[in-house]
């Protein structure tokens, strides 16, 4: 039973560039959430996808966008990268019908460094 | 904006010591409280999810309690071992169904 997988694990981008991060949820899960974790802080909720639609969004600018595919996998896109976007990006999967109070399964994250 | 606070920020204990840390969260619109253990270079691992005031959960030497009326949860580790060294995160769910995380407590257990 494959857990949550993310790619790439590490990447370096230049300010102003765009980045795409990918996530495959745990087998059987249909909901994907993305979190940003800056150094020394807890994960911050970016947004959540279910049935290929953004269902909830945290306090992040429109430069952060996403997509969910029919196979439930998801992408996080960040445009016009800023130095402050350097962080660990975590993908989490769950079941929509158990949305609240449900155990969330995390991937190991994608480390993004913006220089 | 929801505020979830964890204390202490970090903790160093000797092997065999028992320890506990705190997660504080808003007492309104409570739906669930999660605890996760996050070891370096791994993904966060779910420990407990608690939904009812007064809930107590236990997994081996680790246990957690929940007080939704006053907005806090305690995580206890009995007889800490070096393999317990990790960052412990709590996350609070509102009815909206998204988790707001605290900044974590980093535990280091010295042999």
Image: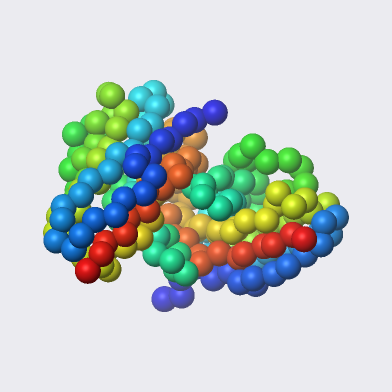
Vertical placement of residue B2 versus A77, above or below: above
How many marks are shown on the rendered structure? 0
Taking the image as shown, residue A93 lies to the left or right of residue A85, namely left
Q: Residue at x 79, y 54 (%)?
A: A81
Taking the image as shown, residue B4 lies to the left or right of residue B82, namely right
Res. B27 image quadrant? top left
> Quadrant location of the C terminus of chain B?
bottom left
Res. B61 image quadrant? bottom left
Res. B85 image quadrant? bottom left
Q: Residue at x 77, y 64 (%)?
A: A13
Q: Residue at x 61, y 39 (%)?
A: A58
Q: Nearer the viewer, residue B39 or B82?
A: B82
Residue farthest toward the right in the current orientation of the protein: A16
Q: Residue B89: horizontal and vertical position, in percent?
A: 39, 49
Q: Residue A99: horizontal and vertical position, in percent?
A: 45, 46
> Quadrant location of the N terminus of chain B?
top right
Q: Nearer the viewer, residue B12 or B27?
A: B12
Q: Residue A43: horizontal and vertical position, in percent?
A: 52, 49
Q: Residue B94: horizontal and vertical position, in percent?
A: 44, 33
Q: Residue at x 24, y 31 (%)?
A: B67
């Amino acid at each position: 039973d494959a857990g949550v997988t993310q790619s790439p694990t590490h990447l370096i981008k230049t300010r102003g560039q765009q980045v795409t991060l990918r996530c495959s949820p745990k087998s059987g899960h249909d909901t994907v959430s993305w979190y940003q974790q800056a150094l020394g802080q807890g994960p911050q909720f970016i947004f959540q996808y279910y049935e290929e639609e953004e269902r909830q969004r945290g306090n992040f600018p429109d430069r952060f966008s996403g997509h969910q595919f029919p196979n439930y996998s998801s992408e996080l896109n960040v445009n016009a990268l800023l130095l402050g976007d350097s962080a660990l990006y975590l993908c989490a999967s769950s079941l929509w019908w158990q949305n609240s109070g449900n155990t969330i399964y995390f991937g190991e994250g994608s480390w993004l460094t913006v220089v | 904006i929801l505020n979830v606070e964890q204390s202490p920020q970090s903790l160093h204990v000797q092997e065999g010591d028992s320890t506990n840390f705190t997660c504080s969260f808003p007492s309104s619109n409570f739906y669930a409280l999660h605890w996760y253990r996050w070891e370096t270079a791994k993904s966060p691992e779910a420990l407990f999810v608690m939904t009812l005031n007064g809930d107590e959960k236990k997994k081996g030497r680790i246990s957690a309690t929940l007080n939704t009326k006053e907005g806090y949860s305690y995580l206890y580790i009995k007889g800490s071992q070096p393999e317990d060294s990790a960052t412990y995160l709590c996350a609070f769910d509102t009815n909206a169904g998204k988790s707001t995380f605290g900044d974590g407590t980093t535990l280091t257990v010295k042999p």
